[in-house]
Image (spheres, rainbow, N blue to C red):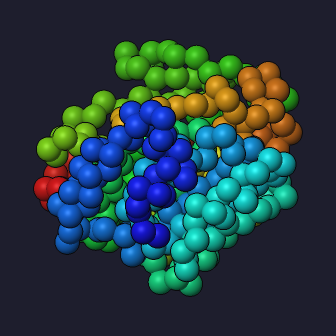
Amino acid sequence: MKITEKYYKSVGWLNEQNSESLFSIDKVVRHKEYLKSRKGEFVNFNDLTFVFQTFNKANRLNEVLNPFLQLSPANVILFADGCVDSSASLAGALLPGKNHLVLSTNDTYEICNYRLSLQIAKTWGCKYVALFQDDDIYDMSIFNWLNYSLKLLEFDRKLAIIGGNGGGNMGKTPPVVGDEGLKSAVYEPCLIEGKNGFRLGKYEEILVPVLEKKVNDFLLQYVAVVNRAPQIIRISAADELNFFPEALEPYQYDDYHNCFSSWLKGYKILLMPFRGKKCIFSEGGMRLFNSVTVNSRPEHFIHNWNHILNKFGDAWNSGEIMHRVNIANREDDNFPLP
């Protein structure tokens, strides 16, 4: 896609009556210089597939996609899941490239869509997928984060996932089997052995990691589990470890499955927070949590939680997962410069 003044106007970045509405002509010119300055890096991100999921966000889709379209990414998949507005048709107009795929799905939800995106990206010859959601709007610094993430993944073939939206470590309190109480449990901040954390009722304790390592402007730390989004996944690790398993459909606790599986098979999970975004979750993010609020969790949350406990409970309770995390943080200080 050739980025021109006409394009900027067509997607609402330039307004003929108000050239300062979002991006002025001067900013467009500076952006072109910015592209030239990045030559030789991961421009177009040919090894990477960008994956977006959206639900009825036609009014926001320009804002969500435009920062990424500035670099004309080679590989993009967008799931318009359960949409009854014009999200799918608008996305099709914004994504006309050869490997730009818009899938209008009928409530297939998060896990199924992400698993399919990994399969498609693999057929395109990509090594990685970058997962994004429709309740975040990014600024241009996302490309610094992406470039350094890809450099880290190329540097360390045992790095399976990099998360940019928070993560945590496992508290020592053994997790409790999910029952009807899980549907009304409330997340609340707490102290765990004097350290900051949060608790989901009686079921779960998560320690908030203290990020002690810094490489240039990036804080980073190995942690037990990372959240989405952004999140970059190594496709070969996902294949080996069955990321986004059918057993956990339609959604919830797949992040635990992917991260715990990785640690127990010798891979690592890295938290590298990205701050250059604004969240519009108050408008309803994806289809995932539109009708799922505290005191209103669906029945499959209980099933999925117990699935995680059955598969990983011993490693969690024994401290094996955190033992591997701690070893990685002690021994792996040799991060390359961006």
User: What residue do we see at 74% from left, 44% from top?
Assistant: 56
Q: Position of residue 170 (x, y in %)?
A: 48, 37
Q: Position of residue 242 (x, y in %)?
A: 61, 69
Q: Is residue 167 above or below residue 109?
A: above
Q: Is residue 159 above or below residue 82?
A: below
State which quarter of the image contains the C terminus. Answer: bottom left
User: What residue do we see at 52% from left, 16% from top?
Assistant: 189
Viewer can see residue 110 = no
Q: Quadrant of residue 69?
A: bottom left
Which of 212 and 204 lies nearest the eye of the viewer? 212
Which of 239 and 266 lies nearest the eye of the viewer? 239
Q: Position of residue 96 (x, y in %)?
A: 58, 71
Q: Position of residue 100 (x, y in %)?
A: 57, 71
Query: Does residue 216 appear left or right of residue 186 in this picture?
Result: left
Query: Does residue 185 appear left or right of residue 40 in this picture?
Result: right
User: What residue do we see at 68% from left, 56% from top?
Assistant: 90
User: What residue do we see at 13% from left, 56% from top?
Assistant: 337
Viewer can see residue 102 = yes
Number of numbered callouts drawn: 0
Query: Does residue 169 appear left or right of residue 25 in this picture?
Result: right
